[in-house]
């Protein structure tokens, strides 16, 4: 078997709704076996994530996150993804890391929003103005036609640039931007909470993406206490990511407060128009595997 090379040119043939549905379909297959390794050097991180889904295949994705890279004119996140054949374990494909990561990350939270946000949601606040926020704007627009975007960023210039690119509006008032939103999406590198539970109002949905280390938080304890909590995967979020690991360790929330992950589609749903829902995106390797296989199928 000669491994296939799948590059960024496939992006033009991908569709946000279809990719989110590929994630949903993957969770109807046997539960993934998952193994994660995290290495740290100060603010720098290497994540090696592996997944095996019987009948779908195996994937190993290594990501390096160097927050100082943009100051050097380099991408903050880099890496590689290897896809292996389920029948014989041979290397089936090398799929472009940035292609998989972009579509997996945004489609993960899009699937959560499609299940949890009110269908009439249109006012969307993006907290953060990087590549993930830009991808989320595209993804949300596919599921919520007529969506209106407000962008807040630590650097006002970044918010202004993304607002100009997507036809949204920049805001320098995070509290007002959160209070006025139907959907709040956080995609930052914050290590201390930015979004306060006191700002939330009935009916909102929050997609939390940015935190990936034990020392990272994007929302405060009050936000978690006020919301019904969901995760993409209990296995890759509760014990690994500060957003939930920290409040769990202090008894602010309990594991049973997490209502469902994507393997429990019947429970992963909004019950009423008034409740606040919150979904934590952990981005495990099983999601990379599901999306990489879908990309390979689309590539033909």
Image (spheres, rainbow, N blue to C red):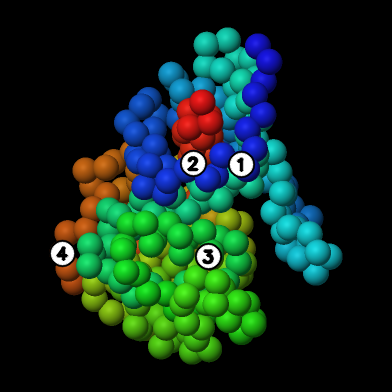
Position in image of residue 116 (x %, y %): 28, 58
The first of marks 2 and 4 along the sequence is 2
Whichever of callouts 2 and 3 sits on the residue coming sooner in the sequence is 2
- Looking at the rendered structure, the secondary structure element under dot 2 is helix
Q: Mark 2 or 4, which is nearer the eye?
A: 2
Name which residue lies at 54% across and 55% down: 241
- Which x, y percent locates residue 134? 53, 64
**Sooner in the amino-acid sequence: mark 4 or mark 3:** 3
Disc 2 packing (10 Å; few <14; some 14–19; many ≥20): few
Asked whether disc 2 touches disc 3, contact meaning CB atoms under 8 Å apart, the reply is no
Spot the residue most to the left: 272
Q: Which residue is mark 2?
A: 13
**Callout 3–callout 1 Cβ contact below 8 Å:** no
Rendered image quadrant of residue 76: bottom right
Residue 262 x, y percent position in the rendering:
35, 43
Q: In the figure, is residue 240 to the left or right of 277?
A: right
Residue 129 sits above or below residue 245 on the image: below
Q: Residues within 10 Å of mark 1 (few under 14, many from 20)?
A: few
Q: CA distance from mark 3 to mark 1?
A: 21 Å
Task: Give how far apart the Cα atoms at labels 4 and 3 are.
Answer: 27 Å
Q: Secondary structure at mark 1?
A: helix
The residue pinned by badge 4 equals 272
Looking at the image, is mark 4 or mark 3 nearer the viewer?
Answer: 3
| Circle 3 residue | 133
Residue positioned 67% across, 20% down in the render: 3
């Amino acid at each position: 078997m000669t491994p296939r090379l799948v590059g960024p040119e496939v992006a033009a043939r991908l569709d946000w709704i279809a990719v989110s549905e590929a994630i949903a379909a993957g969770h109807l297959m046997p539960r993934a076996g998952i193994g994660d390794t995290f290495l740290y050097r100060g603010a720098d991180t290497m994540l090696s994530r592996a997944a095996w889904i019987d009948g779908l295949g195996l994937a190993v994705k290594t990501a390096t996150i160097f927050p100082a890279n943009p100051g050097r004119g380099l991408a903050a996140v880099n890496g590689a993804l290897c896809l292996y054949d389920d029948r014989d374990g041979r290397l089936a494909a090398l799929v472009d890391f940035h292609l998989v990561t972009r579509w997996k990350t945004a489609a993960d939270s899009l699937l959560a929003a499609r299940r949890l946000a009110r269908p009439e949601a249109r006012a969307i606040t993006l907290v953060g103005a990087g590549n993930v926020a830009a991808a989320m704007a595209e993804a949300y627009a596919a599921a919520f036609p007529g969506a209106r975007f407000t962008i807040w960023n630590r650097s006002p210039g970044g918010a202004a640039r993304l607002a100009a690119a997507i036809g949204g509006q920049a805001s320098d008032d995070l509290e007002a931007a959160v209070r006025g939103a139907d959907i709040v999406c956080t995609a930052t590198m914050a290590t201390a909470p930015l979004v306060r539970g006191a700002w939330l109002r009935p009916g909102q949905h929050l997609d939390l993406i940015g935190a990936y280390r034990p020392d990272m938080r994007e929302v405060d304890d009050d936000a978690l206490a006020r919301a019904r909590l969901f995760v993409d995967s209990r296995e890759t979020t509760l014990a690994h990511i500060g957003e939930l690991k920290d409040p769990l360790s202090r008894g602010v929330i309990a594991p049973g407060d997490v209502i469902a992950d994507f393997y429990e589609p019947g429970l992963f749903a909004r019950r009423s128009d008034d409740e606040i829902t919150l979904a934590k995106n952990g981005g495990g390797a099983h999601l990379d595997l599901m999306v990489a296989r879908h990309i390979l199928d689309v590539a033909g």
